[in-house]
Image (tube, helix red, strand yellow):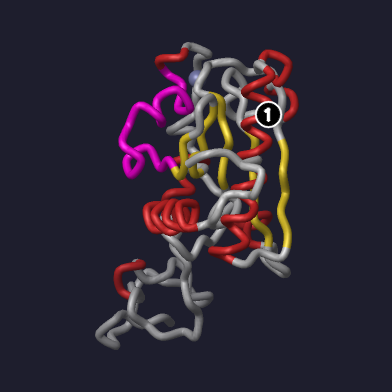
Amino acid sequence: MSRGADGTAGSPAEDATGWPPAPASTFAHVDDGYDRLWTPHRMAYIDGEAKVTSDAPQECPFCLAPTRADEDGLVVARGETCYVVLNLFPYNPGHLLVCPYRHVGDFTDLTREERYESADLVARAMRVLRAAKAPSGFNLGMNQGPGAGAGVAAHAHQHVVPRWDGDANFLPIIGRTKALPELLADTRSRLAEAWDRLPEEPDGADGPR
Ligand SMILES: [Zn+2]
């Protein structure tokens, strides 16, 4: 028979297996040797709260983000034709997206200038993440079209995901929950500072802030 927070017995209706359990409020503080990782922001994604249901630019998070202040839009750096923003639903802390300002979805729709600058920004994002967070690897890539898993298919965005040895475990698969040890606002300010601090490549190849 389970016991409540004050040591009293649980519900008299409880059966021999201990079911139903005592209300959660009665065992919130009981030390059972486990640390709980609460990641409620993931539920917004799982529930589809932020799911883009239209291709219209006025509903597009990648059109909206650069119109806000850097802190509010989670913008890390701005180039001439493209900018760098934190993924609201990161796979890892420091998961960045490089987007054109223009609302175009397909890589072939990008101008040459946008393609060049986005590649430069990806390179600088890698250098900044290495300086700030010392990952041991990266996943880089673009999901082109809904069939390929693009969440916002109408506005092209390239993922830069820092990776650390052993950063993946069973939790995202079994629990559909990813534990992230840093808040987005803190990640953004840390990376924006690192972006400004990092010297430009000698040939200026990795773009302006
Ligand atoms: Zn857009």
Residue labelled with disc 1: 116
Q: Position of residue 38 (x, y in %)?
A: 44, 62
Residue 202 highlighted magenta (yes or no): no
In the displayed structure, does residue 109 sit left or right of residue 72? right
Q: Position of residue 10 (x, y in %)?
A: 34, 77
Nearest to the observer: residue 135 or residue 113: 113
Residue 209 picture location, percent across and down: 47, 41
- Apparent side of residue 28 relative to residue 166 in the rendered image (left or right): left
Circle 1 crowding by C-alpha within 10 Å: few under 14, some 14–19, many from 20: some
Instruction: Looking at the picture, tell me which residue is in the foreground, 203 or 48.
Output: 203
- At x 40%, y 30%, the residue is 66
Magenta span: predominant SS is helix
Name the image quarter holding residue 61. Answer: top left
Q: Is residue 78 above or below residue 33?
A: above
176 versus 17 height, above or below: above
Q: Does dot 1 land on a helix, a strand or a loop?
A: helix
Which image quadrant: the N terminus?
A: bottom left
Horizontally, residue 71 falls left or right of residue 133, namely: left
The residue sitting at 33% across, 72% down in the picture is 11
> Tag 1: residue type?
Tyr
Image x and y of residue 147, in percent: 74, 23
Query: In percent of the image, x 35 and y 40: which residue is there?
Result: 70
| For residue 109, above or below residue 60 | above
- Quadrant of the rendered image containing residue 20: bottom left
- Which residues lie in the magenta part? 59-75
Which residue occupies the foreground of this view, 115 or 51? 115
